[in-house]
Amino acid sequence: MTYLTRLLMLCAGLALAACTNPARFDDTNTVDLNGGSMAGSAGDPTSPAYFQQAVGDRVLFIIDQYTLTPEARSTLDGQADWLLTNRDYKAVIEGHADEQGTREYNLALGARRANSVQEYLLSRGVPAARLRTVSYGKERPIEICSAESCYAQNRRAVTVISIAPTS
Amino acid sequence: MMHRFLTLLTVLFTALLIQPAAAQDGPLRIEITEGVIEPLPFAVPAFVADNAAAEEAARNIAGVIAADLTGTGLFREIPAKAFISGITSFSSPVQFADWKAVNAQALVTGAVSVDAGGKLVVRFRIWDVFAGQELGSGLQLVGTQDGWRRIAHKVADQVYARITGEGGYFDSRVVFVSETGPKDKRAKRLAIMDYDGANLTYLTDSSSIVLAPRFSPTGDRILYTSYETGFPRIYVLDVASVRRRELESQDGTMSFAPRFGPDGTTVVYSLSRGGNTDIFTMDVGTGRSTQLTSAPSIETAPSFSPDGRQIVFESDRSGSNQLYIMSASGGEAHRISSGTGQYGTPVWSPRGDLIAFTKQSKGRFHIGVMRTDGSEERLLTASFLDEGPTWSPNGRVIMFTRETQGAQGAASLYSVDITGRNLRRVSTATGASDPAWSPLQ
């Protein structure tokens, strides 16, 4: 029996038991599938999923700005390290804006944000050939409310790792 | 085919219309430059069907004419149930007393037949009821039976032109972005329809994001931006064949915000490279591009003047978004916007006298107009999000995108008169954004 099959069976058993007596389960007897170290999962430090969740695939910007905050730089340091370690991957940096602004201006603003991230990664030694940028302007918000709490999440640049290694 | 027919007829009729200029100095006249408070009452009784095949068209045409005129806010329809007499014969004398009694100042009468070749033939006359005489001369329009709405729009354009002294805008189309789905996964596709929302056709599928379509000066081609390669790029689409090709494909760049120049061969657009957005022109025939601006600031949303000599655009070189005008060959630009707030998406009016724009101020969005020197700024609308004005062919009406607030927010098209009156929602089957008005067909 493979490790995965055993895990799945264990989970099925847990799910059934959970229906009858949910109070019996806590951290000591719960298996977190994402907490393991299977190849390709977020537990595998060479996986895009790890990059997305553990390194952090996005940085946020203040209104109308494209300069990197200290927090953004720290995230990008992690991204650069990961990209320098995992040399088979490429990345597309997506620049986004919140909905306050015209479509055209937001496309240009998203281009500036994506470029800020690209410039920083280049300065940390990531080869230019592995990076591309694209702006979505205000076309792809991640949060949909019309309030600053959502706008703050939408003013972002996301580093998207190519799914398949290039070599 | 019908298009050629109508064009030919229109040319013929324009000659006949020189005479009625005198009649427009009479009582039946709307002086729209001064703004109209009281709409002019008119009646369009059902057109007379000269043969059985024409009955349906005869019934429908009057309704479209009335809707066109009422939609301007300058006219008010006298409902059919108030009529004292109907029109049963196109050639019989008009009973002016009956129309005066219901206060119809203008009267449109017409007859419809289907000829031996299956063509729809529409004859009509416009009457000044209180003067007791015809306004201009009667006209005859011939087209396909399917094209009855276009013929009705042409009649309404004639009524509008003879009474206001300005060109009409009803026989025109609008290309826009049809929107469906939630805000974070919105599906967008190009669609084209008559200016009043009828005869909707889709031009692309929704597999990639499409933005901001713009007509060529003759309405035969459409420029737009699509993400079909994964990156925003400009395409030109032939309306009749729906065939498209990529215009600008420099590697590592993004191009967007295209518009035709008045010559129909020059395209002005913006291109981002290394995070910086500047304005370029391209000859669509040769594909040769020229860079017009080269500043580290954002330069985008360019629009040609109708004579092709100048370009108005948006830039944040002063620290906030403002409107600038430069020569069509580039060089020094001068700022025209001077108010507080952010200005964007300037569009030169077809008459050349005004520039429409989007303004963002104190958390609200407005559509406004200003003179080309930046003076006499007037805001026509206000909402959570209004943007992207486009001019009617006669420069009287502006259509734009209005998006509502919140997680359920959706975009739709609105139109407003340049006086700021007559704000109306344009009926569309789905959400809709980025309208562009065609020239008169």
Image (cartoon, rainbow, N blue to C red):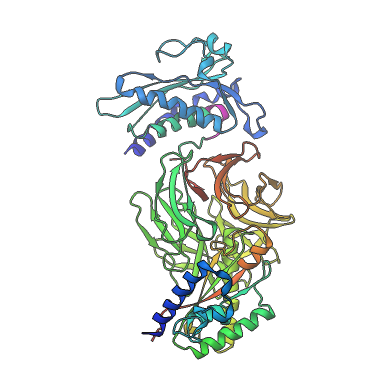
> Is residue B432 left or right of B10 when viewed as pictured?
right
Q: Is residue B132 magenta?
A: no
Work out whether residue B374 can be spotted: yes
The quarter of the picture where residue B51 lies is: top left
Q: Position of residue B39 (x, y in %)?
A: 62, 26
Quarter of image, res B194 = top left
Q: Name the foreground residue: B331 vs B256.
A: B256
The quadrant in which the C terminus of chain B is found is: top left
Residue A25 relative to residue B189: left or right: right
Q: Is residue B251 visible?
A: no
| Residue A47 image point, x, y percent | 47, 83
Please tell me which residue is depicted at 42% across the width and 43% down the height of the picture.
B200
The N terminus of chain B - image quarter: top left
Above or below: residue A62 compared with residue B242: below
Foreground residue among B80 and B152? B80
Which range of residues does the magenta coloring cover?
B161-167
- B367 up-or-down from A167: above or below: above
What is the total number of numbered labels drawn onto the structure image?
Answer: 0
Which percent across, then down, holds residue B229? 42, 68
Q: Is residue B108 above or below residue A109?
A: above
